[in-house]
Image (cartoon, grey):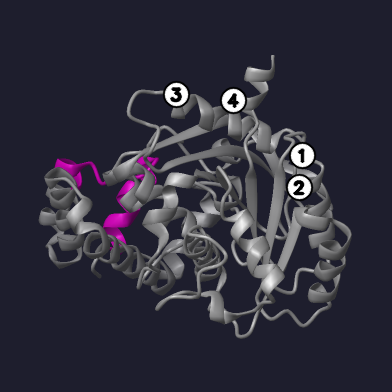
Amino acid sequence: MDEWKEETLKMITVLMASYNGSRYIRQQLDSILAQDEEDVRILVSDDCSSDGSRELLKEYEASQGDRVLVLLRKEPSGGAAVHFLKLLKLMADAAHGPEEQPQHGSLLPEYEMTKSQLAHLGLLAGADYFMLSDQDDVWMPQKARMLSDKMKEMERKPGRGNVPLLVHSDLTVADEALRPIADSFFRYQKISPERTSLPQLLVQNNVTGGAVMVSRSMLPYLKEIPGVCLMHDAWLALIASCFGEIGWVDRPLYYYRQHGGNTLGAEKGDSLDSVRTRVKDGSSARENYRRMFGQADSFYHMFYSRLNREQQETLEAFIRLPRCGRLGKMGLIVKYGFTKNTLVRTLGQMLFIGD
């Protein structure tokens, strides 16, 4: 029995990026602290909030002992995706030990930090697994445990003990008062979590950041911030697809709250309204595609030496897509499998790529 406990209990550090989230963040923190996994700790990075969030977070830090660490940024990070990637890089920087001085490229100088906080940061960076948390969601009590169980299952596979692993789950889309809008985000968005190959993830990310857990073996791949990144979850998915594995739990494990202050929302996949909006606002879709190809280019150059030849060729073909004619695009899409979850979305990408 004791051996079972030792094998199953893992330290989990939850990384939360906060900005002016005082209205909802208390409820989210409480839901994380109430997880039925025994060793769950929280690192909150606040992005220069001005709505009282910093004071609220410091209250949690004072009352929760070593379970909560709050770090205050000196200047804004540059947006949610960059903020999360910087948090992950901060873990990679601190993983060598809190006694080490910041090296060139370290993010430690971007924070107001005492020596005791630096030591606490080193402890959190030693976690077995890392989870990402938005400030306005609410976790179900079993979320950390179920993702951790899936992660352990993947780690037991031959050759999977020291590669970057990513696990994510389904979620319930809810309104501001947490009344369910859709019980399954996978079905609501017509997401196919089994689509985890590099060609598929290059054109459509199937991983939601607030649902993510990554293994400690992901940290060495996060020491550099990409020049272009659509979203942090998409970047993590590409890393796990190329160098490790992606797994998922086909069950909603948290409430994804929709409200007026969301940076990103969840609209019903391929609804007539969403299709009309994308076609009408072509400039927004084209900008999204521009960043998608920029992300692929950043990934290609950052990890070129680690990629196998097939992965290199896939990325090279994808990066060429915008410069091809319509027939050339169709040929590359079919040859390499650059397809989205649905036929409507795959056909729609032809409308905007390179235009």
- Marks 4 and 1 sit apart, C-alpha to C-alpha, by 19 Å
Count of labels in the image: 4
Amino acid, disc 1: Gln
In the picture of the structure, the residue carrying the numbered disc 1 is 35
- Image quarter in which the C terminus is found: bottom left
Amino acid, disc 2: Ile
- Marks 3 and 4 sit apart, C-alpha to C-alpha, by 11 Å
* Picture quadrant where residue 194 is located: top left
Q: Residue at x 55, y 75 (%)?
A: 108
- Marks 3 and 2 sit apart, C-alpha to C-alpha, by 27 Å
Give, as a single range, the part of the protein colored magenta. Answer: 333-353
Q: Is residue 206 something that shows in the picture?
A: no
Q: Residues within 10 Å of mark 4 (few under 14, many from 20)?
A: few
Residues 261 and 342: in front is: 261
In the picture of the structure, the residue carrying the numbered disc 2 is 32
Residue 184: say if magenta: no
